[in-house]
Image (cartoon, helix red, strand yellow):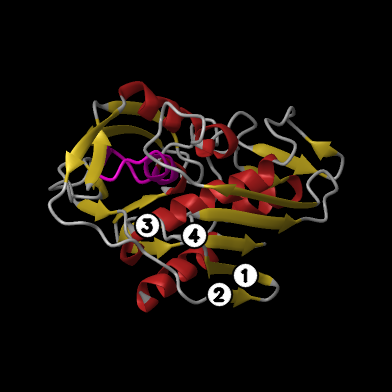
Amino acid sequence: MHQHTLAGEITQRGVGLHSGVSTHVRILPAEVGSDRYFVRVDLPNSPIIPAQVAAVSQTQLSTQLGEGEVYVRTVEHLLAALAAMGVDNARIEIDGPEVPLLDGSAQVWTQSIAAVGLVSQPVSDAQTPITIKEPIWVYQGDAFTCALPAPETRFSYGIDFELSAIGNQWYSFSLTTNNLQKPENTFVTEIAPARTFGLLHQIEYLQKSGLIKGGNLDNALVCGAEGWLNPPLRFANEPVRHKILDLVGDMSLLGKFPVAHLLAYKASHNLHVQLAQKILELI
């Protein structure tokens, strides 16, 4: 059995979606068995924040890990890229409270990971996969997330918006990892490039609520009654693909992806995390 870490260092700098604060990120190789974790190098004693379900502290429009003043926000895109590309162990140093949004997708992260490559790390004990034997459901009104028994890891998502430019969209893909040079890693081509999106009529309210301070037309798609303010889209169904990106990132907090069909409809980071918590309780 093997785990994998990065073969070199990755660095990126950018503005956080909600905080509007510019941060510098260094992603470094990490020892076998150390998992993916953040280090707030700007705080005294450089506290460590594990990328685990138990560390989730907030899920309002993004996923936040940590406690009190020691936290890191909007971790989902970066963690999705690392986990989907097979990086089991990584030290993520960050000098501020929020991961940079970059272009609003995970594409910069996947390109950076592919550029440095991975190294194999032998492990002495075989790892037991997370296998779902019975359906696990989490509901909130007509929204839900669930994990269904399946022979492979598959993500499916549905969204439904009144704005005609988005409307009802569904997308599904099967996840394969540790194959950076192979076309089967559909995450890199089909999911990672999908950018975050927002609704024009909600922007003023969110800004008054202290959110999306770093959002702009260069790092987020914005949709109004007349259509998209900043086309073209990278995919005709880019919004639902981005929701899968978020789900992949949130499910990565389990440490390894379940062998299951992970299905969501009109869900949120909160429902994603509730499903992950329930999976941990039942395995």
Percent position (x, y) of residue 7?
Answer: 24, 28
Q: Amino acid at mark 1?
A: Phe
**Alpha-carbon neighbours of circle 4 within 10 Å: few (<14), some, or many (≥20)?**
few
Q: CA distance from mark 2 to mark 1?
A: 5 Å
Of labels 1 and 4, earlier in sequence is 1
Camera-side residue of 29 and 196:
29
Q: Residue at x 49, y 59 (%)?
A: 151
Q: Is residue 91 visible?
A: no
Of labels 2 and 4, earlier in sequence is 2
* Residue annotated with mark 4: 151
Of labels 1 and 3, earlier in sequence is 1
Q: CA distance from mark 3 to mark 4?
A: 21 Å
Q: CA distance from mark 2 to mark 3?
A: 17 Å
Magenta part of the chain: 79-98
* Residue annotated with mark 1: 144
Q: Residue at x 51, y 42 (%)?
A: 17
Q: Secondary structure at mark 2?
A: strand
- Vertical comparison of 29 with 159: above or below: above
Camera-side residue of 52 and 70:
52
